[in-house]
Image: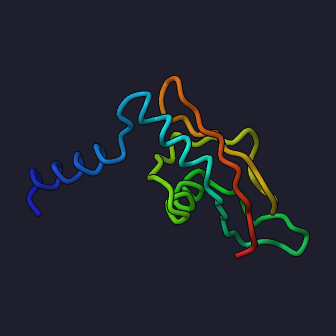
Amino acid sequence: MAPRSRSRGIKRARDAREIRGIEHAQEIREQIEGLTVQVGARVAESGSLFGAITPAEVAKAIKKAGGPAVDKRSITFSKPVKRVGNHTAAIKLHAAVNAHLTFEVVPA
């Protein structure tokens, strides 16, 4: 693939993920907050994880659950996710619009 066509492909993919205005961000927030998301992880017998859940894993789980593509850099946790159970993540979609996603960490 030529460098010029590769850069066009990257720009097209970035434009597809981009939020276009506050109304679009609010639509995406409604989609995200209506999802049931499960993230699989390796778990010890005590219920603690080997490591922690990352924003990239949550973004992948949102997409797998039928939600929109979300940039992993826009996902934040109030504290590290290191246990099985329900957790909440904040997703910054626009300067004025944040979505709050409740997701469940389950043994993989």
**Which residue is painted at 28% across and 43% down in the image?**
15
Q: Is residue 82 above or below residue 42?
A: above
Q: Is residue 75 above or below residue 49?
A: above
Residue 29 lies left or right of residue 17; in this view the side is right
Residue 11 lies left or right of residue 3; in this view the side is right
The answer to which quarter of the image holds residue 99 is: top right
Q: Nearer the viewer, residue 37 or 71?
A: 37
Residue 19 lies left or right of residue 98; in this view the side is left
Q: Is residue 26 above or below residue 34?
A: above
Where in the figure is residue 106, as x and y percent of width and height? Answer: 74, 69
Q: Nearer the viewer, residue 101 or 83?
A: 101
Numbered-mark total:
0
Where in the figure is residue 25, as x and y percent of width and height? Answer: 46, 35
Question: Which quadrant would the N terminus be assigned to in this image?
Answer: bottom left
Where in the figure is residue 23, as x and y percent of width and height? Answer: 43, 31
Q: Nearer the viewer, residue 27 or 82?
A: 27
> How is colour applied across the structure in the image?
rainbow
**Which residue is painted at 47% across and 48% down in the image?**
70
**Which residue is painted at 28% across and 51% down in the image?**
13
Most extreme residue toward the top is 96
Where in the figure is residue 62, as x and y percent of width and height? Answer: 55, 57
Question: Which quadrant would the C terminus be assigned to in this image?
Answer: bottom right
Q: Nearer the viewer, residue 51 or 71?
A: 71
**Which residue is painted at 83% across and 73% down in the image?**
44
